[in-house]
Amino acid sequence: MNQRHNHAVAFSCLVCTLLLYSFASFRFLTATNIENSDFLKYEVNDVFVGNLTHIIRINNLANSRVAGGKLLVPLVQNETTRHYAFLRNISSPIGSPNISNDDSGNLYAYWSNIVIDGKQTLTVEMSYYVFSFSTRFLVNSSLITEYNESSSVYKKYTQPEELMQSDNIRIISKALEITSSARNLHEKVSEIYNFVVANLRYSVQNEEKGAVWALENGVGDCSEYSYLFVALCRAVGIPARVQAGFAFHSITETLEDGHMWAQYYLENYGWIPVDATWRLFDAMDHRHFSSIQSIPGVISYSNYVFNYTTGPEPADEQTVLLKSLSPSVLDEGSFGEDVMRTVQKITQAKLPLFIGSILGASMIFPSEIEQTRKAFLESQIHLQSAIENWNTHQQVAQSHIADALETAEKASSGAWMLIVKIFSMVVGIVITIMLVALAFLKRRQTKQEKAVSQTA
């Protein structure tokens, strides 16, 4: 019994070792850089092309007129490469809006001198084409350099804000306590994120409470989760900021409220997404779209604001819709389709590469697995470069996506070919063992029959 137990333990240890080895090998192929100046920051797991529609209704329920109104709406933008948005159309009965910006680069559409007669509704509709990506960052702490504390990013996003009181003694003390054992900047952020999700309980708030209130009360909605995360990061010298906009659980969902999440900044990686409410760390799905992507200089963190000078207080509401479209709406070429095909090929290559790692492909076919891994990583880096260049250097992006698709197809076919080779070899070994066993049994049977005949 003890011998069987020992064998079982030994077998379990062997399996665990193989799994750990294969996982480490798989992480290696997704995170290792080909050249020091060109490395994989994040992997793309999904792509979405669609239409985002933001509808705002200002309802005058009274008989008297509302006058002197002003409607201000932040516009969804392309500030990060996780989503691109293109304002397709603005429809309203009060004409075209004026467009303004602030010192942080946020854009706003606004209408002034609005009049809404009694029992009437003002409806404004903004329609965007969106091109977005589900991403997961692969942060390698050895590639993070120290902050340039004289940079505009560091100066701006380590300062306290009205609802992110990073200079508050309670915030500072808690941030230092949380990060005391962290070995690097990324671990500090990770510990802060873990603290926020472990110590806040989700509950919708009727007004913005801020980071100090969230810390003291241990409760809040997406705003408090984001404010507290950002304040704690800033308190220990890590640039961080809030994102305000819209987030969909599915493309069939209709929203009536906005959402808030956060980003933190690492040198060599840029802005990295975090949604503590949705338990997303170093990752973002393709259904988050931000309209305030930095410190707002005109309004608070809001999806829209309507003010007026005279008349009864109106009721206001918003509806936000998301609808998938063909990638061809993006341009006359095939960039969107090629991105989708590349992501599909990369996804198809992951499974056979993982299986190959488990089956010991590195030991059996070392040169083939190395070539396949290199093609896999090259395709991801080309895809990353294509996405990051598409809005500013489209020819460069087209070149990268062509290379990404080619190397992704090579990686996918190479990975599956390795699996076929390994299984063919395994089947050959099994058949050989079976034939040897059958020959042994046949020989033994022959000996037994001969012995019986001699005895007789």
Image (cartoon, rainbow, N blue to C red):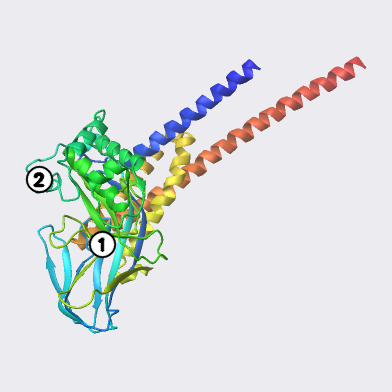
Q: Quadrant of residue 114?
A: bottom left
Relative to the observer, which residue lies in front, 5 or 95? 95
Identify the residue at horizontal 15%, vertical 49% (top origin): 161
Q: Residues within 10 Å of mark 1 (few under 14, many from 20)?
A: many
Q: Position of residue 157 (x, y in %)?
A: 15, 47
Q: Which residue is most to the right?
A: 456
Identify the residue at horizontal 23%, vertical 61% (top origin): 302
Q: Which residue is most to the left?
A: 150
Relative to the observer, which residue lies in front, 255 or 344? 255
Identify the residue at horizontal 34%, vertical 66% (top origin): 256
Mark 2, residue position: 155
Identify the residue at horizontal 88%, vertical 16% (top origin): 454
Give left or right: position of 17 versus 92: right
Label 2: which secondary element: helix
Eye-nearest disc, 1 or 2: 2
Q: Is residue 144 visible?
A: no
Q: Is residue 28 visible?
A: yes
Label 1: which secondary element: strand
Q: Quadrant of the N terminus?
A: top right
**Picture layout, residue 169 above or below residue 409:** above
Q: Quadrant of the C terminus?
A: top right
Relative to the observer, which residue lies in front, 25 or 279? 279
Mark 1, residue position: 84
Q: Position of residue 279 (x, y in %)?
A: 36, 47
Q: Residues within 10 Å of mark 2 (few under 14, many from 20)?
A: few
Badge 1 amino acid: Tyr
